[in-house]
Every structure is written in C-alpha cells, then in structure tokens.
Amino acid sequence: MYSVEQRYQRLKNQLLFGTFTLLSLCGFGTGWYVFAEGWSLSDAIYMTMITLSTVGFAEVRPLDGDRLRFVTIALVVLGVINIGYIVNRFTEAMIGGYVQERKKLQEQQKQIDRLKDHYIVCGLGRTGHQVAREFTEEGIPFVVIDSQAEEIEIAHELGYVCIQGDATLDQSLLDAKITEAACLIAALRSDAENLYTILSAKALNKDIRVVARASTEEAEKKLTRAGADAVVSPYTTGGRRLAAAALRPQVMDFVDGILTGGERSYYLEEIRVDDEFGDYLGQTLSEARLRVQSGALVLAIRRKDETLIPGPTGNTVLLVGDSLICMGTPEQLRALNNILLPIQPDQPMRPPQR
C-alpha cells in the first residue's frame, strides 16, 4: 500500500502529465492552423481553445477540407479525454485529502526536526503501542517508525509523531534523527528485524541506548551480542510477573503503581552522577542529606562497573559514574535534581536523566 507521501507524489506527477499533454495539444492545434492551413496566430489560438474546451462557439473560419475537419475532430476528442483526466485526478486529490495529509506530514517533519535527546519506538504492535502509551503519559518526546500504513494512521489519530518506513533501513532511522536520539526501542514483529535494527542503530549512533524485545532465550543472547543494552522478553517477564502477583500480590500492586499508569503519585527516576555534582562527589548519603532536602528516597545505586547496591546505607559514598535510582513524587524528584544539578539564574531547569 502506498504511503500518503507516495500517493501525493503519484497524483502530482499525473496532474503534471495531464497539464503537459494539454499544453502539447494546444501547441499542436495552434501550429497546425497556422502552418498547415495558413491562419493568423490569433485565429489559430482561438480556434484551438474553443475546440479543446468544446464550448460550442462558431468557427472563426469555415472548415472546408476533410483534412481540416479530421484534425479538428481529433482535437475535440483528445481535449475531452485530457481535460476529463485532469479533472478526475484533481477530484481524487481533493476527496482523498492528500493535500491536507501532506501538510500534516510537513508539520510533523518540523516537529521531528526540533527533537533532541528523544526516544525512537520501532514497531507499533502490541508492545510498541504500550511503550508509546507510557511515553505519552510521562511526557517523553518520541518518534514512532512502522511500515504498516494502518498502524501509522492509528498513530496519527493518537497524536504520535510517526514515520512510515522500514526501521531496519538506515534512512528510516536517519529520518527519525537517530544521531541525536537518547534511546531506541526495538519492538518489531520478529527477532530478525530487531537484530537488523540494532545493528543499524549502533552503526549510526554508537552512544545510543537500545532496548529490544525478544521472543526466545536464544534471541535474547543474539540481540545482546548485537549491541542491545537491555533485552526484554514479554514471555519471560510476563511469567515472572504472574508468579509474583500470585505469591506477593500487594508488592506487585505497589510496583505497578510506581511504574505504570498516568495517575500514579510516585515515580522512579534514574539520575547519573557526573562531574557537575560538585561538592556532593565523595560524600556519603548521610553527609549529602538528599532525603532531608528533597524528600526523595534513594532505593539503589549502580556503580560505574555495573555493581548494584540495593538499599544503600547512610555510609554509601557518591562516586562519579554512579546511577541513583530514586523514588518520590514529581516535586520531590524535581527538588532532588535541582539539589544535585543546581541551575544558573539564566538557565532553564535541567530534567532528570533517564
């Protein structure tokens, strides 16, 4: 099925072809009357126009010879066919709304051009729709790539910024500004497509974080070797969640409440420690007094070497490269972010890193 852009371009080419053909008929008719019949230029142009348009005005000169009459008849027939073709193409463009759709695509492209540090969701299946829904609820800027026209139409209705294309191709990823994106979600319909997408993404932007969907354990290993920073299997994760919901239902309700849903009160955030932390580097959590100042709770710390420290104590030291996994209300997390990364009076507030 053609995309909106392809249909628009096809109709545009057809209209240009019809217009060129009509102008060619005008030139042929005028030239014939002038050079073959010896008419004046004004008489030739007028006769050609009333013949092609079939308005029914009287001839400017008598059509004496059979040759002249046959040429005039040919101009009438070809003119009716050509004008009908142009009207048909123009009507299809108006009724189909391709002009309006293309304007929407141009506006959407402007939105994409303004994006930076955004997320790219590849594939709008059941997994991709859920990811997009979560990003929308959290106000995360993202672009959707899918090859199915039906899915793209649904995405447009939901207000997503989307691109119809093959996510395994470099051009589709470049159209989504992958060189300036923060993360890519590979949620395509097959593991092979996700594998190709990861290879393309890492080749175009080696620093981008890639999260991939896998159907099997074997696919998880291959996607990780291909460069995926995290691989999620809906079947494995779903099984674990089912077991946890059966054994620890209250815990799962709490976890679901802070991880998903648009009306939750508490959020989980990840803040990476870097040189901008200034005086807090080398301090313990007790000395930094982050909980007292912000109200947010530091649940865990992942060191630069990937060592995880769950439930850090007050004696845990903050080091460069640490990732603080924090829980709190939006106001508490915003306060924690401002404490660790104070802004200048003339600068906007820096959002937490994800």
Image (cartoon, grey):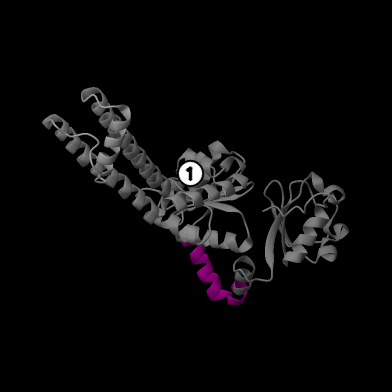
* Residues packed near mark 1 inside 10 Å, few (<14), some (14 to 19) or many (20 plus): many
Residue 251, image x and y in percent?
62, 73
Q: Amino acid at mark 1?
A: Thr
Q: In the image, is residue 243 part of the stretch drawn in magenta?
A: yes
Left or right relative to 114: residue 346: right
Left or right relative to 304: residue 123: left
Q: Which residue is mark 1?
A: 197
Left or right relative to 258: residue 210: left
Q: Is residue 226 visible?
A: no
Nearest the viewer among 323 and 14 is 14
Q: Can you say whether 285 is above or below 265 in the image?
A: above
Q: Is residue 242 visible?
A: yes
In the rendered image, the residue lying farthest to the left is 66
Label 1: element kind: helix
Q: Residue at x 58, y 61 (%)?
A: 136
Nearest the viewer among 35 and 282 is 35
Nearest the viewer among 268 and 252 is 268
Q: Main secondary structure of the magenta part?
A: helix
Residue 88, image x and y in percent?
30, 49
Q: Residue at x 40, y 46 (%)?
A: 8
Q: Which residues are magenta?
A: 234-252
Nearest the viewer among 100 and 294 is 100
